[in-house]
Image (spheres, rainbow, N blue to C red):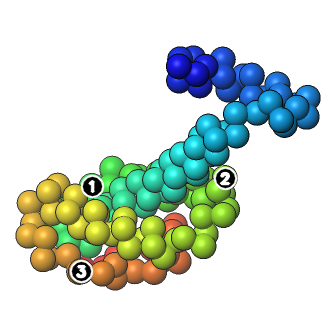
Amino acid sequence: MTKYMKDFYSWAREQIKLLKKGQFDKLDVPNLIRELKTKGRSEEQELERRLTLLLVYLLKWKHQPAKRKKSWKLMIQEERTEYGHVLKENNGLKSQLENILSNAYDLARVKAAKKTGLNINTFEITCPWGLDDITDDDFYPKQ
């Protein structure tokens, strides 16, 4: 069993030391590659998660105007901020935004139906808003 599998923290510290010393021939390259891929995917998933939550609240806002609460507006603002932070820290994800939006919206429809009790077909099959609207602090959908 390798150090990578037995003690990840020590393995990671060792890899950092080797990188700093320029001892590239001693690096555990296969596991470094695996970790970098995993890290990249987790950042993409975090962006998608934030966008999904934002879309759920926008769908609720649009389809349940009589039930709107101040907390919904605050959640929309919070998720816009969090989404912006994740994207700012991972600028390379910009090229994936359309795909991320599509995936996020698919899940948002399901979650919105679950949270509201409305039929899933109440919600448009494809996202009715562009990313510019979704992330605009002044945008709140009309019914």
What secondary structure is marked by label 1?
loop
What residue lies at 30% left-to-right and 81% top-to-bottom? 126
Instruction: Determine crowd level at label 2: few under 14, some 14-19, many 20+ residues with C-alpha closer than 10 A.
Output: few
Q: CA distance from mark 3 to mark 1?
A: 25 Å
Towards the viewer: 110 or 26: 26
Q: Is residue 60 left or right of residue 32?
A: left
Q: How many marks?
A: 3
What residue lies at 15% left-to-right and 63% top-to-bottom? 113
Relative to 95, does residue 42 appear above or below in the rendering? above
Q: Nearer the viewer, mark 1 or mark 2?
A: 2
Q: Is residue 81 visible?
A: no
Q: CA distance from mark 2 to mark 3?
A: 30 Å
Picture disc at residue 69: 1
What secondary structure is marked by label 2?
helix
Place of residue 11 in the rendered image (x, y in percent of width and height, measured from the top left) = 66, 22
Q: Quadrant of residue 84?
A: bottom right
Picture disc at residue 125: 3
Towards the viewer: 43 or 141: 43
Q: Quadrant of residue 141?
A: bottom left
Asked whether disc 1 touches disc 2, contact meaning CB atoms under 8 Å apart, the reply is no
Q: Amino acid at mark 1?
A: Lys
Q: Is residue 119 left or right of residue 37?
A: left
What residue lies at 91% left-to-right and 29% top-to-bottom? 21
Work out whether mark 1 precedes mark 2 in sequence or the reverse, and give the earlier one.
Answer: 1
Place of residue 46 in the rendered image (x, y in percent of width and height, measured from the top left) = 48, 50
Q: Nearer the viewer, mark 3 or mark 1?
A: 3
Residue to which mark 2 is pinned: 89
Q: Amino acid at mark 3?
A: Ile
Work out whether mark 3 precedes mark 1 in sequence or the reverse, and give the earlier one.
Answer: 1
Picture disc at residue 108: none
Asked whether disc 3 touches disc 1, contact meaning CB atoms under 8 Å apart, the reply is no
Q: Amino acid at mark 2?
A: Glu
